[in-house]
Amino acid sequence: MAHSKINEMTLREIATATDLNYFYLQRLSREKHFPDPIRLIGRNKIYDGRHVLAFFERRKRKAA
């Protein structure tokens, strides 16, 4: 059984991918519905990019 590779991203990479402000993302990352980081590398939190992008899709649908 093959496991799919997790799309690991830092907040800076997420900011670039979503065209959002890094500091806005830092604030969002402290919200209770934002996906939890999957690990830490130094002071950088690493997130599963697929879960984060799904989070923004849900927010977009809610706002519509």
Image (spheres, rainbow, N blue to C red):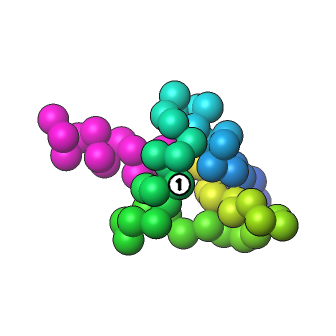
Is 51 contained in the magenta span?
Answer: yes
Residue furthest front in the image: 23
- Position of 4 with respect to 17 (left or right) is right
- Position of 20 with respect to 32 (left or right) is right
Q: Residue 32: x, y in percent? A: 38, 71
Q: Nearer the viewer, residue 26 or 50?
A: 26
Q: Quadrant of residue 1?
A: bottom right
Q: Nearer the viewer, residue 2 or 60?
A: 60
Q: Residue 39: x, y in percent? A: 72, 70
Q: Quadrant of residue 34?
A: bottom left
Which residue is located at x 63 percent, y 49 percent? 11
Which residue is located at x 36 percent, y 42 percent? 57
* Element carrying mark 1: helix
Q: Residue 62: x, y in percent? A: 19, 46
Rendered position, 44 above or below 55: below
Residue type marked 1: Gln
Which residue is located at x 53 percent, y 54 percent? 26
- Position of 52 with respect to 33 (left or right) is right
Rendered position, 38 above or below 61: below
Is 34 contained in the magenta span?
Answer: no
Is residue 3 in view? no
Residue furthest top in the image: 19
Helix, strand or loop: magenta stretch: helix
Rendered position, 18 above or below 29: above
Residue at the spot of label 1: 26
Q: Which residues are magenta?
A: 50-64
Q: Residue 17: x, y in percent? A: 59, 32
